[in-house]
Image (spheres, grey):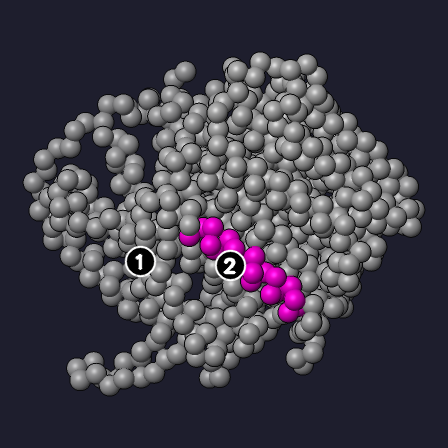
């Protein structure tokens, strides 16, 4: 009874909030209130879900009362629950951040409605247990993201938004194609059921490898993995800061989650090819992201290329597919979602305050904004993985797992990439906050309380997460188990029988 | 029968690739629509085509068509419809704002000054 | 610089012609299409049809009026804000599945019963029809909103 309601709350709360806001019409202040309240409610629901999953194991609800392999069901294991919690926290922070930064015109044109529908799609993609349903939720959040990226209609938003739309449309069509192939092989859409059917699969490996490559293409495009990242730096540059924070923190991570799910559940027969290819692509992504992050002085670009590095590191963990590697990947996934949103918000604050995105043209801001400066440094260290902070644990486990599996080059690349991250972030810090002072009279007078409130709040969440990492270890161990031991994910089907 | 539909979907996807590689916005949009049609046809084929049977599981019906691909296609068509609607409005906005529908002229990032 | 749209004469869209034949036929055909849309809508669930097709057809009927007459007339005849239509439709589609919580059943579980109506005989009464009304309204609303936006850009 509680599972039935609880499992759907993260999807239904934002949808209802969106509908209520649609009924209100163009009243920005009311929209703020509703979206803020629904953000808080989502956090509460997600905490409850995490506690429930921790006590009772994987949470399953059968939509429409159809039995498991036939109907659609919502399956929330620990990994999904943690991702739902992180998504809710980031949503709340971004909504509060938007109050003062997105601009009243965009707010009037249903900005918060679109944010809420996007969150509903993201939460749905995290919690569904059905591969076609996952496609539907992908489309839900992509449609909302198309609106968000073009909302406001400036020239750059339109031209970059069109490219973003086109790339994602093509990859979505391939998603349908991949689902079609998979359905013709297994005759099922339920992910756990597909796993059980493929476990004693004795057909041709070629077709499974082709399906693996199709899925790789689809999710790599959404996540921005090496050959298919080309749209990401351009498209993420265009929209206003809160939207970038949402996209950078959530959308690429949904792609990674989908890769991890499908590669742990479906493509287990030919790991020598599929997972090695994934590892190779992940490493190339790290290298390319490092080059990009060090090459630019534009703050937005540097952080955007840092997304690519993080994507690569998480995928290294998931491609190794042993216990330590997946625990590290889960740690790093959660850490990166929080810290990327925080960094984008801090950079956004600097850009709003100074009106310039190029860090070379700024300087000496530490005198005006000491708190922001030190918070930025802390966030940068966390991103690079300096020990007591949250990025360290993920990287530590991933590197350990890489060395355990004799992938020495992979481990070294992950370690060296931390240096690249550190250099790129500290250079922004030195340029913006240190050096000789810029002309302070050009600063824009903005109200900064809510901008700083949410960004510093997220940094504090990240630091707490780092300090409490030991205490949270059982949660992450449980979350990782459904990736390296997919039978535990599928157990809800076997236990019924 | 399957072979024919697979070839048709190949033709559809091939022509959509040709259209999407052109420079005009409208051609690209028609290309995406064609791509989704090709993919949906493929999806239908994957459920094994049987003519003259109903997609219903009933104790009295012994020979039935798989209803799941049809349900999936319906969903996918609805999504493709929404996307096409959105992209058409977007293309019109772009034509008004940028003043061209040639994608070659839509590049470059403005710098802050 | 020559764009296809310009080549196709997009800039030179003529003002709407006052076409008597089209207007008269549209008045008649409008009702036929609307009735057919409702027929398809009620045929849904057990036979081909349903909210999506019905909604599209209803939108098509109104778009026919838009083509035959101009936008002002249509707005006078059908004084509905399409955004509100979408909101109402979404509310229908989201509230009904949630109601099943109060019956202690999972999300989206539907109830059905058979009722004897004097003229029609035995009629199946489904809770899913309320969800379908929501789909109908949302689809019709969004199709019309899109056409309206394009038409407004034009003017």
The chain ID associated with circle 1 is C
Report whether residue A5 is seen: yes
Residue at image mark 2: A41
Quadrant hosting residue A488:
bottom right
- Comparing B28 with A386, the one in front is A386
- Please state which of the two labelled residues, at mark 2 or mark 1, is closer to the viewer: 2
Numbered badge on residue C135: none
> Where residue A9 sits: x, y (%)?
52, 63
Q: Residue at x 41, y 15 (%)?
A: C1
Q: Nearer the viewer, residue C57 or A475?
A: A475
Please say whether residue C121 is one of the residues in the magenta stretch: no
Q: Is residue A36 magenta?
A: yes
Examine the rendered structure and indicate whether residue B29 appears above or below residue C11: below
Q: Give the range drawn in magenta.
A: A34-53
Relative horizontal placement of residue A435, taking residue B23 as reference (left or right): right
Near-viewer residue (A413 or C151): A413
Residue A213 visible? no
Where residue B9 appears, as percent x and y from the top left, is 52, 48
Majority secondary structure in the magenta region = helix
Q: Quadrant of the C terminus of chain A?
A: bottom right
Question: How many angstroms separate mark 2 from mark 1 (CA)?
Answer: 23 Å
Badge 2 marks a residue whose secondary structure is helix
């Amino acid at each position: 009874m509680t599972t039935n309601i609880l499992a759907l709350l993260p999807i239904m709360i934002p949808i209802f909030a969106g509908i209520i806001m649609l009924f209100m019409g163009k009243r920005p202040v009311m929209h703020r209130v509703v979206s803020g309240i629904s953000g808080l409610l989502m956090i509460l629901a997600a905490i409850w879900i995490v506690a429930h999953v921790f006590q009772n194991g994987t949470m399953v609800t059968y939509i429409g009362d159809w039995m498991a392999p036939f109907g659609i069901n919502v399956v929330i294991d620990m990994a999904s629950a943690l991702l739902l919690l992180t998504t809710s926290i980031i949503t709340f922070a971004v909504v509060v951040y938007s109050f003062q930064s997105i601009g009243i015109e965009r707010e009037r044109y249903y900005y918060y409605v679109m944010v809420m529908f996007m969150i509903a799609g993201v939460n749905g993609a995290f919690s569904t247990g059905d591969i076609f349903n996952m496609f539907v939720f992908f489309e839900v959040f992509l449609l909302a993201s198309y609106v968000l990226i073009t909302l406001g209609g400036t020239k750059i938003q339109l031209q970059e938004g069109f490219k973003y739309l086109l790339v994602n449309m093509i990859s979505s069509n391939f998603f349908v194609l991949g689902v079609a192939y998979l359905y013709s092989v297994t005759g099922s859409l339920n992910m756990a059921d597909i796993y059980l059917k493929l476990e004693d699969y004795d057909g041709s490996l070629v077709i499974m490898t082709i399906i693996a490559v199709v899925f790789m293409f689809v999710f790599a495009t959404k996540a921005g993995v090496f050959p298919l990242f080309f749209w990401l730096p351009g498209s993420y540059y265009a929209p206003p800061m809160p939207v970038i924070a949402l996209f950078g923190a959530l959308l690429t991570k949904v792609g990674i989650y989908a890769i991890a799910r499908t590669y742990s559940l479906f493509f287990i027969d030919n790991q020598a090819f599929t997972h090695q290819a994934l590892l190779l692509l992940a490493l190339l992504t790290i290298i390319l992201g490092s080059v990009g992050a060090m090459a630019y002085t534009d703050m937005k670009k540097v952080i955007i290329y840092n997304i690519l590095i993080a994507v690569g590191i998480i995928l290294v963990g998931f491609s190794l597919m042993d216990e330590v590697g997946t625990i590290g990947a889960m740690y790093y996934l959660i850490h990166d979602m929080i810290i990327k949103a925080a960094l984008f918000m801090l950079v956004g604050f600097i850009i709003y305050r100074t009106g310039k995105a190029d860090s070379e043209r700024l300087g000496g801001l530490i005198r005006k904004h000491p708190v922001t400066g030190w918070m930025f440094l802390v966030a940068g260290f966390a991103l690079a993985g300096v020990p007591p902070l949250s990025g360290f644990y993920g990287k530590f486990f991933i590197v350990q797992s890489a060395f355990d599996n004799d992938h020495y080059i992979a481990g070294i690349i992950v370690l060296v990439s931390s240096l690249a991250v550190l250099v790129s972030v500290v250079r922004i810090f030195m340029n913006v906050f240190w050096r000789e002072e810029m002309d302070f009279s050009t600063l824009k007078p903005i109200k900064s309380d809510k901008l700083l409130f949410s960004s510093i709040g997220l940094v504090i969440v990240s630091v707490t997460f780092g300090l409490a990492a030991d205490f949270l270890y059982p949660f992450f161990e449980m979350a990782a188990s459904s990736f390296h031991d997919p039978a535990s994910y599928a157990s809800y089907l076997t236990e019924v029988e | 029968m399957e072979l024919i539909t697979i070839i048709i979907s190949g033709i559809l996807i091939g022509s959509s690739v040709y259209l999407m590689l052109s420079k005009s916005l409208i051609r690209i949009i028609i290309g995406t629509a064609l791509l989704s049609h090709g993919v949906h046809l493929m999806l239908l084929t994957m459920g094994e085509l049987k003519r003259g049977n109903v997609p219903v599981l009933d104790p009295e019906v012994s020979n039935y068509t798989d209803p799941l691909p049809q349900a999936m296609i319906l969903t996918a068509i609805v999504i493709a419809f929404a996307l096409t609607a959105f992209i058409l409005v977007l293309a019109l906005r772009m034509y008004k704002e940028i003043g061209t529908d040639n994608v070659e002229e839509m590049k470059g990032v403005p710098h802050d000054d | 610089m020559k764009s296809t749209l310009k080549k196709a004469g997009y800039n030179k869209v003529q003002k709407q012609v006052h076409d008597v034949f089209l207007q008269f036929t549209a008045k008649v055909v409008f009702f036929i299409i609307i009735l057919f849309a409702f027929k398809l809508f009620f045929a849904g669930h057990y036979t081909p049809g349903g909210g999506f097709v019905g909604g599209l057809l209803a939108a098509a009927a109104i778009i026919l009026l838009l083509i035959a007459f101009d936008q002002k007339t249509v707005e006078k005849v059908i004084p509905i804000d399409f955004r509100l239509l979408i909101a109402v439709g979404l509310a229908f589609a989201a509230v009904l599945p949630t109601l099943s919580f109060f019956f202690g059943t999972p999300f989206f579980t539907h109830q059905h019963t058979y009722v004897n109506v004097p003229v029609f005989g035995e009629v199946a009464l489904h809770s899913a029809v309320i969800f379908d009304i929501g789909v109908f309204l949302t689809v019709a609303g969004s199709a019309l909103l899109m056409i309206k936006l394009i038409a407004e850009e034009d003017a």
